[in-house]
Amino acid sequence: MIVYYTDMRHKDDNKNEAIFQATIQLLNEIGFSDISMSKIAKRANVSPSTIYVYFENKEDMLKKLYLNVKEKMSLKMLDGINEMTPIQAGFELFMSNLKDFVLDNKDYFLFLEQFTNSPFIERLCLDESIGYFKPILDFVERGQEQHILKKVDAHLLLIYCYYPVTQLAKEHFKGTLVFNQEKLKEITQMSWDAIQA
Amino acid sequence: MIVYYTDMRHKDDNKNEAIFQATIQLLNEIGFSDISMSKIAKRANVSPSTIYVYFENKEDMLKKLYLNVKEKMSLKMLDGINEMTPIQAGFELFMSNLKDFVLDNKDYFLFLEQFTNSPFIERLCLDESIGYFKPILDFVERGQEQHILKKVDAHLLLIYCYYPVTQLAKEHFKGTLVFNQEKLKEITQMSWDAIQA
Amino acid sequence: MIVYYTDMRHKDDNKNEAIFQATIQLLNEIGFSDISMSKIAKRANVSPSTIYVYFENKEDMLKKLYLNVKEKMSLKMLDGINEMTPIQAGFELFMSNLKDFVLDNKDYFLFLEQFTNSPFIERLCLDESIGYFKPILDFVERGQEQHILKKVDAHLLLIYCYYPVTQLAKEHFKGTLVFNQEKLKEITQMSWDAIQA
Amino acid sequence: MIVYYTDMRHKDDNKNEAIFQATIQLLNEIGFSDISMSKIAKRANVSPSTIYVYFENKEDMLKKLYLNVKEKMSLKMLDGINEMTPIQAGFELFMSNLKDFVLDNKDYFLFLEQFTNSPFIERLCLDESIGYFKPILDFVERGQEQHILKKVDAHLLLIYCYYPVTQLAKEHFKGTLVFNQEKLKEITQMSWDAIQA
DNA sequence: AATGAATGAGTTTTCATTCAT
DNA sequence: AATGAATGAAAACTCATTCAT
């Protein structure tokens, strides 16, 4: 059996990821106000000072974590959609992708929700995340040119697709209802009714 | 003979309110993770120990603040709607009420958003807040019996009314767009398309 | 017997002084690089956080301590000297005062020496301390007008009075020699030779 | 056959010197209490662990640095003075040498001042540095035998030569006055008045 | 020889809360 | 009721040093 030793003394992706995972878990368990670098370190099985080998400070770590998770979600949402995809099919795929991501990645999703609603996010320069948004704008524009989608602000159309899925998922997580295939069908219909021209 | 003491109760509503206001302001400025009892006290112009005259501890204070604000918002949302109100008119009033509350009470609203998305809320026993929800359920039920609203879970219908307004308001606060009367008209139409049978 | 309780819950001069004394002692024992707020607190028999009731932060505390000690020394140096004192008598009193202060207040003196030679002092805005210097300048000026003192920069004359005393005291503390009355007589003569016109 | 390796010793004098320079600079910029091995390493463009190749630990490094700089200064002070030099000429050369060294090597000088006034220096066994002192003692003795210098403790005579120069230089660095040739002449006269028999 | 990663022990400071009045 | 002082516990972060290569 051959063991490849990569340079063990170089920055370790596992540790980076362990810190990210620990942070997300704790954030969802105890919230922004109660996480601390030492709790994160304990959960990640590293020394608190090790976190500072990988990140400048708490803010830097949270920012990088946010961008990392945001990218994961954005990629998944648009998976399989391109400039050829018919509008309604693309819309349905988006709803389905989003539902899958959210239900499969409860931790990621709840982390993003918490982060997005905290004033913390304003302190960061997160224009980079806007990049993920561009393809959606293009898609919406195409739908409007083809007179399929209502001619309103793209943000508005998006709201009618994003929140039904995510808020339903939240109720699902709370136990208030079950987000099954039937529910997805229902909101796909309702959202379509809302956005179609 | 009846004597009205201006200051009949010992606890002073002004101070209570000052603490609430200070907390909301700070929460929106610096977020959950950075507020502290002494910062709140300083902002409210009281001593830190005074807060403990009015509340058991930090958690108790936040909980009471949440319920207080939540009630304000709930009352406003349903203002003018009763069991006689026609369904579509009630729906439109709800949208309009919600928009007014959110735009007029940015601080209250953002505080609620932040609070609602934090795991903190689960630690509290907040069944009481469900009380505010009952009239909405009744209204939805009536709309469904009259075959005006889609026969889906009430939460679902509500999502299509609540989030378009609130998320549009957030974009408005961010400066991404302007939430004017026209935008309200647009989403009122879109939401109605979504929920009507 | 009557005991006057001053308000025990108000800031306590004893504590302030205890913190100052602890800082001076530690500074002289282990130096700038090794003092810490917790060591100071332990030595002063208070909690580390108590220091922050009395001072904004470490820098603020050190600054206030410096000004406090500097004032003590300045007052002592000029004790008994006024605008009527004959020049030579004033000079001799200065030398004697300085010797007394330094030998009687080893801790204060060594603290000042250390502080004065650290770049820390530049970060502080310590123009206030210059106030103590004014009477000396006036005295020198008078001596020059009367053609008793050499007509050179006042700083220069002062150097020839201050350092012989203080550096001799340092040798005394080190054990290299004994700073007795005879030595004082010697340097009083030498310094006078240096500064007289 | 003899081969000269340019890099014959393994330890690299450049790196040693880089570490020394970095330490001196930082010490003068931020002071004893704020330097750290990693800051020094960064400034010297080496890894923190490299410092431990050259020195046992922080204390060892500072000690060696001190002795290194102390030697530089001592050599310069006595430059051109030997057992034949006439007393007054030797005295004047000393003053001039000292002025040159201090003004030309602000960093070295301020470092020494800071170091000398810290209790750190007592923890070190620095008897070695006394070696540099011997020639001065001999010179003073000779001056006293020739009835040129006052018959007082050599330290005392030295104080009247050393501090006028160095303290004037400090005022110069602070910007309070300019240490030019004229000032040197003035203090050379004053010091001579003080020490001559 | 040289170094980047790693860390336990330490740093300064703030926290929620209680005490004494 | 109201409060300034006080504090143990914990926060974020840095330290000198060692490890593995």
Image: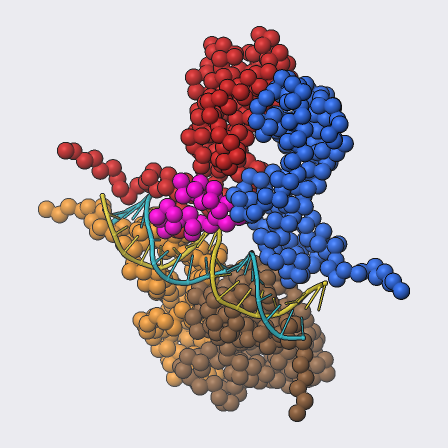
Chain colours: A brown, B orange, C red, D blue, E yellow, F cyan
Majority SS type along the magenta span? helix
Whether residue A6 sits left or right of residue B4 in the image: it is right
Rendered view: B184 above or below D25? below
Rendered view: D146 above or below C126? above
Q: Residue furthest top?
A: C146
Is residue A174 among the parts visible in the rendering?
A: yes
Q: Residue furthest left?
A: B1
Is residue B109 among the parts visible in the rendering?
A: no
Q: Nearer the viewer, residue A129 or B156?
A: A129
Q: Nearer the viewer, residue D58 or B19?
A: D58
What is the x, y in percent for residue D170? 63, 32
Q: Which residues are magenta?
A: C21-47
Q: Which image quarter: residue A153?
A: bottom right
What is the x, y in percent for residue B172? 55, 61
- Residue occupying the point 77% across, 32% down: D80
Asked whether C37 falls inside the magenta stretch, the response is yes
Asked whether C130 falls inside the magenta stretch, the response is no
- Residue occupying the point 35% across, 70% down: B124
What is the x, y in percent for residue A159? 56, 73
Q: Nearer the viewer, residue A50 or D70?
A: D70
